[in-house]
Amino acid sequence: MGTIKECKSLVTYFKQSSLNSKLQKSLKQEVETRWNSKLEMLESINDQFEEISDLLSERDELDKIGSIDSNILQILINFLRKFREASDFLEGSKYPTLHMVIPWYKILINHCQVNISDNDALIQLKTVVGQIIVNKLKIENIYKIAVFFNPKMKQLKILEQSDALWVKDQIKQQCANLISQFTNDESDNSTNTVQERPTKRSRKEAKEITDFSQYYDSSSEEEEEDEVDQYLKLKAPKDKNLDLLQWWNDHKNEYPALAVLCAYYLSIPASSASSEREFSATGQTINERRTNLNPETVDSILILHSSLQ
């Protein structure tokens, strides 16, 4: 949009003319490769709009800001703040994020829905950005599965019914595979013990080997529930600020197989921001004066740096 181009030109002029030093806070320029830098640029101008106008008026250069509509500037800022909120959460590294990809996707799509009260500029902006989100962001199956491990969303109402059924089926299969693996490991351990000589069965016991369960009344038997069924019947936690990892740590004995799957899926970050931060920290650690550091030493420094943040 024209307003954004004018803002970029204004920031460039203030930096080149040394006017930035006369402001309380320096104007920030947009960086194409940096998230939310466009919003930071607009906010830096909007917060000091009057001060910028006064400086330009003294130099008889109000034309530098004349094409910037303050109303449109505020509309852009309000619209983009929701995207910063989403990216700030999804780039976190101290808490699970993968299970919130789809919820944030839904929030942003709804944020781009046109309202009756929207003006022409906002309608155009919402239409373009909403289409970009749909075209650029692909909802992977792993995002759908991760939602299941949020106790507040375990019924998967956020997904289409077919997707919800597919996720529950996948989780059931994976749980069954884990339980089978646990059972095999236990049986392998039991073979290491001394085997006792089988005792001779009596005639009465031999007769009882025949299985007549196929003729039993079904009403007298209750189908055994697995972990997934028990988890789905659990009441959703009421805590608004639920610590997901702590919740699963408290319930790992109730749902051992699900807890293993949860540790696998929720350990996957939703974005590459955390790994990019580690690469940046590595570049700062290994500089010209520290080129002889051992790899083990570098690993230790990075682990300490990450844990102390």
Image: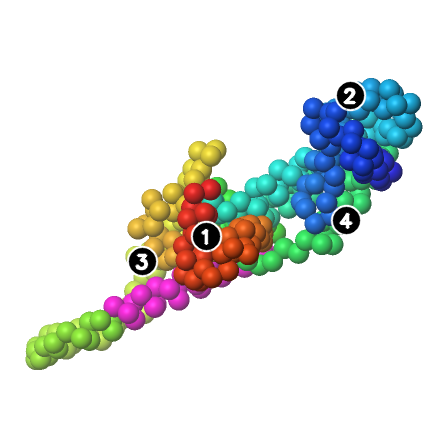
Q: Which residue position holds label 3? A: 221
Q: Main secondary structure of the magenta part?
A: helix
Q: Amino acid at mark 2?
A: Glu
Location of residue 263 (image quadrant)? bottom left
Above or below for 294 versus 187 = above
Judging by the rendered image, the residue that carries numbered circle 2 is 51
- Closer to the camera in the image, 152 or 41: 41
Q: CA distance from mark 2 to mark 1?
A: 43 Å
Image coordinates of residue 187 in percent, x first then y, are 24, 71
Q: CA distance from mark 2 to mark 3?
A: 79 Å
Q: Earlier in the sequence, mark 3 or mark 4?
A: 4
Q: Position of residue 214 (x, y in %)?
A: 32, 69
User: Which residue type does callout 1 highlight?
Assistant: Leu
Instruction: Work out whether residue 21 can be spotted.
Output: yes
Which of the 4 image quarters holds residue 198?
bottom left
Q: Amino acid at mark 3?
A: Glu
Q: Is residue 274 left or right of residue 198?
A: right
Q: Nearer the viewer, mark 3 or mark 4?
A: 4
Looking at marks 4 and 2 on the same chain, the residue that comes earlier in the sequence is marked by 2
Please name which of the two marks, 4 or 1, marks the residue nearer to the observer. Answer: 1
Q: Residues within 10 Å of mark 3 (few under 14, many from 20)?
A: few
